[in-house]
Image (cartoon, rainbow, N blue to C red):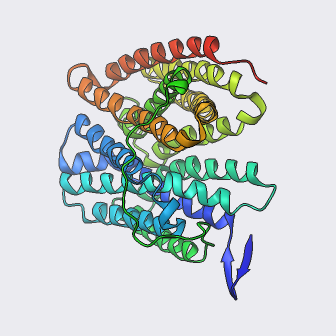
Amino acid sequence: MIVRMNGTRRLGSPAAVAVFAIGMAGTTLPTPLYGLYREQLGFSELLVTVVFAVYAIGVISALLVAGDYSDEAGRRPVLLTALALSAASALCFLLEGGLPLLFTGRLLSGLAAGLLSGTATATVLELAAPGHEARAGFAATAANMGGLGCGPLLSGLLAQYAPWPLRLPFLTHLALVAVACVLTLFLRETVPHPVRWPRLRPQGLTVPPEVRGVFAPSSLAAFAGFALMGLFTAVTPAFLSQTLGEHNLAVSGAVVFSLFLASTVGQALLTRVGVRRALPGGCLVLVIGLLLVGASLAAESLPLLVLGALCGGLGQGLAFRAGVAAVSGAAPPEHRGGTISAFFVVAYLGISLPVVGVGALTLWLGLKNAGLVFTVCVVALTAGVGLHLRRVLPPES
């Protein structure tokens, strides 16, 4: 969609979707490459997971400090800032200067994702044509999860079949970010009277008392689903190479891509399933996916791992989007933004803390057994949350 304003052609929602997807792809770009960095720099699997988890610190910091900044500053300036942070992250990886630069690159990537998550979603929705809001909502979801999935797929293919495996993926991303910046400059600003350099107002965590009954189990379900995503994006490449003997980086990227693709499909199913059934149902599907992942670890089976990724991603997507809908629907309008931000903070804790725990356990139990312990713990959490949700959620109206 293209509109004309003041003699200038302005791009609409599809261009904002492309910007969103490009920005999010950069956050998962290093996933298939961690093994190469581990060989080059000689660090342990624990450090791999810590490098990965630094990303979540950046996301949570951006959500808490600048989650609603674009409401005042305008969408385009914040989108451009996020893209600049994404480009700076890619440059850190290009320099290959050791662990400090890897940590810095992941932190910058997390800050970019934190700014993009809310701002790009709002931009896609606000640029949608009248009557197409539901379609725009799914497009924003697809851009988010699809971008996260395309990152490892792109870097895995380039690292496996093209020269400069630790450089070309990030050079490619820098080129895509440049395209995204041009698209952003031509997006229509949807904030009526943006303020130049408004003061940052850290939001903290806000959960009104009337929401807590739904918030706690919904956010724990998101925590469990994001823990599975963290496991796949941080540890799966090592499991494929060290346990299954699969050293093809394109295969590693494709396995991670399948998880995010399934999550996108799961989120799309919410409108057909409804929140009341999607939250506990998503937990059930997630449990099945986790059991398949555990079985793949025990049996050292790649097909079971892929099935686990597809099933777990489907359950994660269904439960996550239903959780957002349940929490936002229960929150009073004056506290809705803060409540949703708190929900995302809990979810992103799931992508970091359990994964670091797995990395620590590998030092004593090995990668396979650490993964099995993780699976048992998250299955217990998810099953308990799913059963509780069946009791506390009101019937569909």
The image quarter containing residue 50 is top left
Q: Measured from the top left, where is residue 67 in percent x and y? A: 45, 51
The reply, left or right, for residue 245 in relation to residue 334 is: left
Name which residue lies at 48% across and 35% down.
Answer: 343
Q: How many numbered circles does the render carry?
A: 0
Q: Is residue 387 left or right of residue 155?
A: right
Q: Is residue 163 left or right of residue 363?
A: right
Viewport quadrant of the C terminus: top right
**Residue 374 point in image, percent of width and height:** 38, 21
Q: Nearer the viewer, residue 357 or 223?
A: 223
Q: Residue at x 58, y 66 (%)?
A: 191
User: In the image, is residue 195 above or below residue 262?
Assistant: below
As drawn, the residue found furthest toward the bottom would be 7
* Front residue of this view, candidates 73 and 35: 73
Position of the N terminus by quadrant: bottom right
| Vertical arrangement, residue 174 with respect to residue 277, above or below | below
Q: Is residue 56 left or right of residue 391?
A: left
Residue 137 coordinates in the image, percent (x, y): 68, 49
